[in-house]
């Protein structure tokens, strides 16, 4: 069975929005956070762009009453400085790193427990020039794998849980 990644993406966007709205937060300089194709034709810069790459069911963790999924997430940081393209390149790398730090910070302080883990995969400081209608902007990105579960309607099953810290799997009889 497949799940809709929109709930997971919305929670991640909320994590980042919380940090953006905090005047002393890691993302207080970000003008907007977009998700998927939901982006303005002339977005306010700097901005973050959330893209889901792959969503897979984790069959080792899935049981009769819980389905576990792994979501591959890319957070793109887009910056533009018309006076200094080198500075724009550095700003995009810095913003991508801060976005990853903000995601990790919000995850560790969240009591929601929707996500079992959020694991850093890679950082792409490519500073790719994105050709726009009038000028160029720079983009860098961070990638994460987000493990989350959804309840099923089955009852009386054995449940497995992965420790948030060690990654060990423990078995419980419900």
Image (cartoon, rainbow, N blue to C red):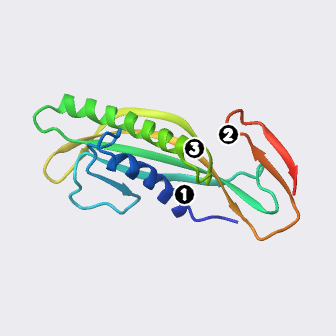
- Contact, mark 1 vs mark 3 (Cβ under 8 Å): no
Residue under the point 29% across and 44% down: 23
**Label 3 crowd bin: few (<14), some (14–19), many (20+), radius 10 Å:** many
Q: State how far apart marks 1 and 3 are (Cα).
A: 11 Å
Residue 40 found in image quarter: bottom left
Query: Residue 171: percent from the left, percent from the top?
Result: 85, 46
Q: Which is nearer the N-term, disc 3 or disc 2?
A: 3
Q: Which is nearer the N-term, disc 1 or disc 2?
A: 1
* Relative depth, front residue between 115 and 9: 115
Q: Is label 3 in a helix, a strand or a loop?
A: strand
- Residue located beneath label 3 in the image: 145
**Label 1 crowd bin: few (<14), some (14–19), many (20+), radius 10 Å:** some
**Quadrant showing the C terminus:** bottom right
In this rendering, the answer to whether 111 lies above or below 2 is: above
- Residue located beneath label 1 in the image: 8
Left or right of 161 in this view: 172: right
- Residue located beneath label 2 in the image: 164
Residue under the point 86% across and 50% down: 172
Left or right of 42 in this view: 122: right
Residue under the point 51% across and 63% down: 6
**Label 2 crowd bin: few (<14), some (14–19), many (20+), radius 10 Å:** few
Q: State how far apart marks 1 and 2 are (Cα).
A: 18 Å
Q: Is label 1 in a helix, a strand or a loop?
A: helix
* Relative depth, front residue between 174 and 96: 174
* Relative depth, front residue between 129 and 155: 155
């Amino acid at each position: 069975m497949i799940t809709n990644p929109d709930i997971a993406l919305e929670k991640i966007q909320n994590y980042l929005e919380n940090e953006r709205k905090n005047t002393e937060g890691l993302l207080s300089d970000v003008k907007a956070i977009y998700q998927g194709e939901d982006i303005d034709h002339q977005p306010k810069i700097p901005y973050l762009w959330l893209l889901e790459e792959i969503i897979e069911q984790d069959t080792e963790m899935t049981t009769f009453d819980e389905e576990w999924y792994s979501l591959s997430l890319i957070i793109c940081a887009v910056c533009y400085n018309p006076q200094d393209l080198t500075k724009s390149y550095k700003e995009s790398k810095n913003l991508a790193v801060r976005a990853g730090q903000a995601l990790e910070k919000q995850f560790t302080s969240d009591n929601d427990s929707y996500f079992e883990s959020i694991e850093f995969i890679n950082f792409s400081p490519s500073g790719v020039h994105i050709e726009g209608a009038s000028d160029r902007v720079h983009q860098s990105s961070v990638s994460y794998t987000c493990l989350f579960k959804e309840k099923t309607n089955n009852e009386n099953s054995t449940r497995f849980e992965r420790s948030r810290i060690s990654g060990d799997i423990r078995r419980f009889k419900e």
